[in-house]
Amino acid sequence: EPEVTQTPSHQVTQMGQEVILRCVPISNHLYFYWYRQILGQKVEFLVSFYNNEISEKSEIFDDQFSVERPDGSNFTLKIRSTKLEDSAMYFCASSYGGGGRSTDTQYFGPGTRLTVL
Amino acid sequence: GDSVTQMEGPVTLSEEAFLTINCTYTATGYPSLFWYVQYPGEGLQLLLKATKADDKGSNKGFEATYRKETTSFHLEKGSVQVSDSAVYFCALSAGNTGKLIFGQGTTLQVKP
């Protein structure tokens, strides 16, 4: 069964450093998402991506964040200058979205735990 | 704005007990509703969903009915097992991009 994969599973970085979190969505999916979950808190939406552009972003997704689909299979989240409060589990998700249908079921990856020291 | 509220956890039950986890929502329009489950150390897995009022989603013995009149989507299971121990998230799909808005999650612990 196809699944969303994410690498690395755990990333430790120093405050102020850039990190890139990688995701490989399910191959025929058209909508891509990033969410994050700070330890013990709810899962929060960061950004959605469709047709090679950001379709929506949350207030959390400021200028320090960017997303890219560099090669038609990977979907990346870059944090330019990490802060302590960026420490969280980051989940990638994708949905089929054929015909622009955004309400299809989202399938989640296992997450990347980011620790900022 | 749109939001989801779940009952506080943790919920501790004995094996074979009846489970209810309450979920209510606030939304403009007609969102789709979901329950996701997160087992220890794993990502989120879709448990069930309902896309319109009065729809019942079901999977692995779990059920939830989309109640528009009470804006609720309570999760139920008739007989829980130890393997059901996990965190359960209620969510709604909002807006044109389908972003999910999650509740705070409810931890379920089932004891033998």
Image (spheres, coloured by chain):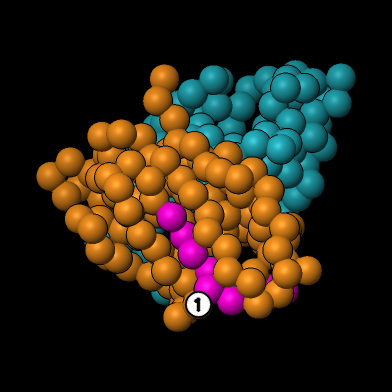
Given residues B32 and A10, the one toward you in this image is A10
The disc numbered 1 marks a residue on which chain?
A: A
Name the quadrant containing residue B38: top right
Q: Is residue B4 above or below residue A22?
A: below
Observer able to see residue A13: yes
What colour has chain B?
cyan
Provide the letter of the chain coloured orange.
A
**Residue indicated by mark 1:** A64
Spot occupied by residue B36 in the image (x, y as percentages of width and height) = 53, 40
Given residues A106 and A49, the one toward you in this image is A49
Type of amino acid under label 1: Gln
Report whether B106 appears left or right of A58: right
Which element type, helix, strand or loop, lies under badge 1?
loop
Q: Which residues are magenta?
A: A76-85
Residue drawn at x 47%, y 60% as measured from the top left: A77
Q: Is residue A60 above or below residue A20?
A: below
Spot occupied by residue A103 in the image (x, y as percentages of width and height) = 29, 47
